[in-house]
Image (cartoon, rainbow, N blue to C red):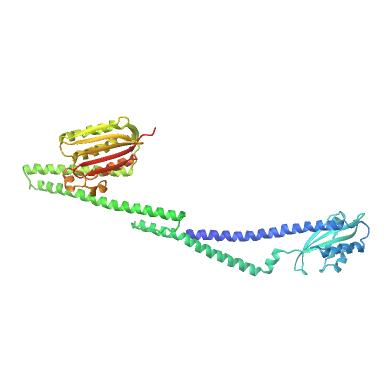
Amino acid sequence: MRTFAGKIWTLIVSFLLITIAFMYLFTDFLYEQLYVEDTEASMIEFGGKLATKYKGGAVSDELIAEIEEHNNYSIFNVFAVRNPRELSACVPFDIDYETLIGPDERRQLLEGNAVTKIGYEERFERQIISVILPFTDENRLEGILYLYYPLAKISELASKEVVLLIAGVVMFSILIGYLVFKGLKRIMYPLHELQQAVRRMSTGDYRARVGVTSNDEVGQLSEAFNHMAEAIQREDEERKVFLATVSHELRTPISYVKGYSESIQNGFIEGEQKDEAICLIAREANRMERLTNELMQLVHIDTEETDKMYPMVLAETLRDSAALVNTKAVEKEIAIVLELNEEIIIEADEEKMRQIFINLLENAIRYSDRGTSIYLNAVIEDDSAVIQVEDKGIGIPQEDLPRILERFYRVNKARSRADGGSGLGLSIVDKLVQQHRGTLHIESELGKGTIVTVKLPLMEE
């Protein structure tokens, strides 16, 4: 079987059959070896005690009778005889006297050792274990003490009921195999569902989901797959929206550049109008360049990690950022007021940190009224550096605040297009802040101004 469930089923059934065979052989070993050895030892011990009753000389009838009385309460059958042939009158089965006490056995008996024999006896339809102990006097074998006991051999029961045994094993194996198959089918069903969902996703259907029916590893795998599928679906939808928005954003400047350039080329625009058209083409080209650069920056932020993290004095970076945008502020007669804690030290990429606050300050300048002020503050709260950029500008409507960090989202699309805004600035800032394990929060009230709060972790000592 090539399927995973088939391999597990085959493995379990194989182990089951091996276990049955091992248990049978092991049981037979214990029953045969330990049981027979224990019986033999008990018979030799019991016979040895009886043999002490013999004091020498001829074996008397009184001794024979006394020994045979033990048959009334002993589990072993015991007889004392002067001649082995006399056993025919005692034991209920035939004895081969020539093999019973041959030359080797006689030598063992004369040496005082017991002789043990095991053989099948038709009279009992089972094996018989017998122990022979000697009555010796001055190196003469005067008689023998004969004990026998029918062995209850497990293999005889198996051979007698072999068909029933085999049938039972086969039926038991089939039952266990069926139950294992049903159990595996139930266990493997979520994996089968997962396999089908993966195939659907490979074809582009990111709506594929699997049911979570348990809390075990398979259930956790299914849940993880669903989370992954949701993330991929969301990413795919965002990608489609992103591409559609990029296409829309580029369509307008491209149409301007194409239309005016063709008009100039064909001589439809001349004089001052031609100069204005060239200025418009240059402005739209700059806009496309800026949009392309910001898109490339977003791609890099999404795919790269910040690896240039060094200790830096935050106040210096904020002061440099304010100086770089001061020319634009002066043009609108806007004052940038700094209130900075000089002791704040963070671990950051200085270039990206400067980019964050230049972007926030430029936004504040762009949307502030002429003659107002912008406040740039930096303080320590708990274990974080809290930086705020506050302006007294036009503000942001409350309904737009939840989406203000989305890519290409503009509060006032007409005004944003006029001043060159692409709707990507705050998205870039948010990504850069996240790279520095910080948070970005925006509060605003329409007509009164906006407060942008950046919280960054302090450098660990």
Q: Nearer the viewer, residue 72 or 421?
A: 72
Q: Is residue 1 visible?
A: no
Q: Is residue 429 left or right of residue 371?
A: right
Residue at 15% from the left image edge and 37% from the top image edge: 370
Image quadrant containing the C terminus = top left
Tell me residue 411's x, y (percent).
21, 47
Above or below, 148 relative to 425:
below
Q: Is residue 229 left or right of residue 118?
A: left
Q: Is residue 454 left or right of residue 43?
A: left
Tell me residue 372's x, y (percent).
17, 36
Residue 456 found in image quarter: top left
Q: Is residue 209 visible?
A: yes
Tell me residue 289's x, y (percent).
21, 42
The outermost residue toward the top is: 342
Total count of labels: 0
The outermost residue toward the left is: 271
Residue at 64% from the left image edge and 67% from the top image edge: 165
Residue at 40% from the left image edge and 54% from the top image edge: 225
Tell me residue 261's x, y (percent).
13, 46
Q: Nearer the viewer, residue 220 or 91?
A: 220
